[in-house]
Image (tube, rainbow, N blue to C red):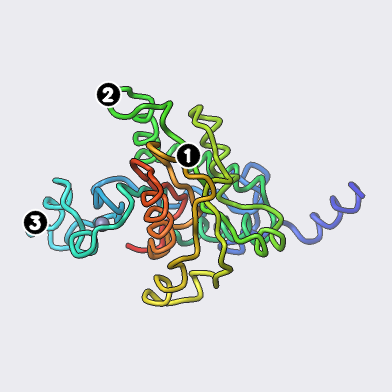
Amino acid sequence: MKLLSHVVNLIFPTKCQNCDSTVSADAATAYFCKECWQGIERFDCPCCPRCGLPYTSHPDADNKSYYEQSAAGHLCGNCRDKPPSFDMAISAGRYTGALSEAIKLFKYKKKVHLGKKLTEWALKSPLVEDTLLNFHNPEYLHTTHTLLIPVPLHVKRLREREFNQSAIIASVIGRRFGIPVVANALIRHRHTRPQVELDGKERKENVVGAFSVEDRKIIEGKEIILVDDVYTSGSTVNECARVLKKNGAEKVYVMTIGRMAG
Ligand SMILES: [Zn+2]
Ligand SMILES: [Zn+2]
């Protein structure tokens, strides 16, 4: 079998899943060439302090007001108009190119080890690392009151996929920072269509009433880090945060690997 796969590799060398070029043996992963993997855009501030929307500087160098305003911690238009239920959301990088291809391979092609690698990559993003390290700072938060909760899948989807990608991401973060992962406190009792198939308004309606808290005692008074793979419109994590807070969670922070908007 080993010899056969070696011969197959010689005849059909591995292609980068993002650009189709041949992947060299020293690539960061077996699926992407060095250029594509290193080309993934990591987020760094300035961004909206509430939803994490990254701000870009104004193309006109003389007009920096938008950039300067955002750098000073101003909320984005969406958060000003309708503040989300979560207290803060952070993402490691822009959901495009190799990052989106890697997340899709992880999620839909059962490449679980890629999920672990992506999480380790995300934890090296300055915004994510700085924020999570603060959870160990007693002046900022109380680690003993912090829980990691993955966005749950409906039992039907969990059976199809065989694993919850968010739970895998949460377990890597939990091990690294010593924060407990609670995967059964929040449940998705309604089967919903994937958010990526829908537009903004539909996304919101799609998830309303889809989640519930199984045991309120687990989350009461806790600071929750809600974990998902991708922040699409924010509707899913916002609905989860609303339900968690309604059931007594003190704070809800959101962490995702990729972010679509912005
Ligand atoms: Zn490539
Ligand atoms: Zn915002």
The disc, 3 or 2, on the residue closer to the chain's N-terminal end is 3
Q: Is residue 201 left or right of residue 31?
A: left
Question: Where residue 39 appears, x then y in whole percent?
Answer: 45, 52
The residue sitting at 30% across, 47% down in the picture is: 87
Furthest-top residue in this view: 138
Q: Which mark is residue 217?
A: 1
Query: Can residue 255 be seen here?
Result: yes
Q: Quadrant of ligand 2?
A: bottom left
Q: Closest to the observer: 168 or 250?
A: 250
Question: Where residue 191 appears, x then y in whole percent?
Answer: 58, 68
**Amino acid on which disc 3 is placed:** Ser
Regarding mark 1 in the picture, which secondary structure is present there? helix
Of badges 1 and 3, nearer the viewer stands 1
Q: Which mark is residue 139?
A: 2
**Amino acid on which disc 2 is placed:** Glu
Q: Which residue is mark 3?
A: 65
How many labels sit on residues?
3
**Amino acid on which disc 1 is placed:** Lys
